[in-house]
Amino acid sequence: MTGGRERVLSGMRPTGNLHLGNHLGALDNWVRLQDTYDCFFFVANWHALTTGPERVHEVPRHTIEMLADWLGAGLDPDRSTLFVQSWLPAHAELHLLFSMITPVAWLERVPTYKEMVEQLGIASPSYGLLGYPLLQAADILMYKAQWVPVGADQVPHVELTREVARRFNNEFGPVFPEPQAKLTEIPKVPGTDGRKMSKSYDNAIYLSDSAETLRAKIRPMVTDPARKRRTDAGNPDVCPVFDLHRIFTPEADRAWAATGCRTAGIGCLDCKDVLLRHMEPALGPIRERRQTYVEKPDLIVDILRAGTGRARAVSEATMAEVHRVVTLTP
Ligand code: TRP
Ligand code: SF4
C-alpha cells in the first residue's frame, strides 16, 4: 500500500457542503496527491466542536455530506486512508501528552486563535479553542506525516507542530519526525457577489449545486461595475466572472471573452453562458458521483470504518513508541 512513498496527512472540519473555493483550494489538490503519496485524510470532528459546540447534532450529517464531496471529487478509498478523528481516541491521548510540554504562550500567539476570538467575538474562549493547533499537531505527528497540504493560514499550525515534535523528542526520546507544510498555488475563487467565496457571505457555489442552480447563480453574478450597459466596454481584469474563466475556460474561448468584453462586442450574459458551458463538464461528473454517495450513507460509513481501521494500526504503532519513552507505570 505504502510502497515506500512519502506520507501526506490533512483533515477538514465537517462544517457542511464544500464549495468551489474549498474544492480548488484543497480538495482538488488532495485528489492529485493520491498519485504520488501515501495519503491520510480525515474528518476533524473534534475540531468542529472548538467553535460551535452547540451545533454538535449537525456533525454526523455534515460528515456524510463532506465525504460525499470528497468521494465525488475523486478521493479514492482504495488508495487513500479516509478516517474519523473521534473514532481514534489515541489522538486525544497524544494531545494530552503534548499539552504537558507546550507553553500556553505558544498557543496564545497563534494567529488563527487571535483571529477566531476577535472575528467571532468570543468573550470567553474555551481551553479547546486555545488547544486547537495542538490537537492538530497530534493528528499530524500520530502518522509521522512528512507533508501537510494546507492553506497559508494553517502554516503557523505546522510550525507549532514542528516545535512540539522537537520538544517531545528532547524531553522524552526521538519519536517524531518534523513535518512540512505543502502549500499549493490556489487560484482566486470569487463568490457570486465578487467577494472571496465563503459560506458565511452567502455567495458560494457548492459542489452539490445542480446544473440549474449553477446557472441561476452565475447569470446574475456581479461583473465589472463599469459595464452598466451592453454598449459599455468592460475590463476582464477587474471582473469576478473572468476570474472563473481563468479557472474553467480554455485559452481560445477566454481570449474571445476578453476581447468581446473590452470592445463591447459581447454582453455579459453571452460571456457567462460560455463560462457555464465550461464549468459544467468539470463539475457535472463530480456532482453526479457525489449524488450516488449521498444516497448511500451506509456505504460512506463503511468506507470510514475501513479507513479508520487502517489508521488505527498506524496510530497504535506510534503510541507504542510513545509509551516506551513516556514511562508512567512500573
Ligand atoms: N485546521 C484544519 C482546517 O481548519 C483542519 C485540521 C485539523 C488539519 N487537523 C489537521 C489539517 C491536521 C491538517 C492536518 O482546515
Ligand atoms: Fe465580466 Fe464577461 Fe461582462 Fe466582461 S463581458 S464584464 S468579463 S462578465
Image (tube, rainbow, N blue to C red):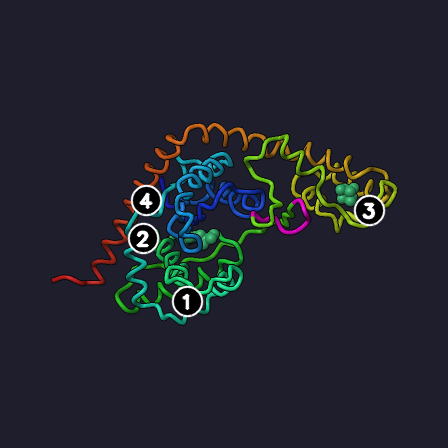
Is residue 9 inside the magenta stretch? Answer: no
Q: Residue at x 46, y 31 (%)?
A: 294
Task: Check residue 311 in the rendering and tell me which mark sits there, or answer none.
Answer: 4
Q: For the residue labelled by badge 4, is the local secondary structure a helix, a strand or a loop?
A: helix
**Position of residue 328 measured from the top left corner of the image (x, y, whole percent):** 18, 63
Q: CA distance from mark 2 to mark 3?
A: 54 Å
Q: Earlier in the sequence, mark 2 or mark 3?
A: 2
Query: Does the numbered disc 3 mark a residue whose Cβ is under 8 Å from ligand 2?
Result: yes
Q: Earlier in the sequence, mark 4 or mark 3?
A: 3
Q: Are marks 4 and 3 in contact (CB under 8 Å)?
A: no
Q: Earlier in the sequence, mark 2 or mark 4?
A: 2
Kind of residue indicated by mark 1: Leu
Q: Residue at x 40, y 52 (%)?
A: 53
Kind of residue indicated by mark 3: Arg
Specify few, some or many for label 1: CA neighbours under 10 Å numbering under 14, 14-19, or 20 or more.
Answer: many
Magenta-highlighted residues: 192-199
Q: Which residue is mark 1?
A: 107
**Position of residue 179 measured from the top left corner of the image (x, y, whole percent):** 41, 57
Q: CA distance from mark 4 to mark 3?
A: 54 Å
Q: Which residue is mark 2?
A: 91
Task: Check residue 227 in the rendering and tell me which mark sits there, or answer none.
Answer: 3
Q: For the residue labelled by badge 2, is the local secondary structure a helix, a strand or a loop?
A: helix
Kind of residue indicated by mark 2: His
Kind of residue indicated by mark 4: Ala
Q: For the residue labelled by badge 1, is the local secondary structure a helix, a strand or a loop?
A: helix
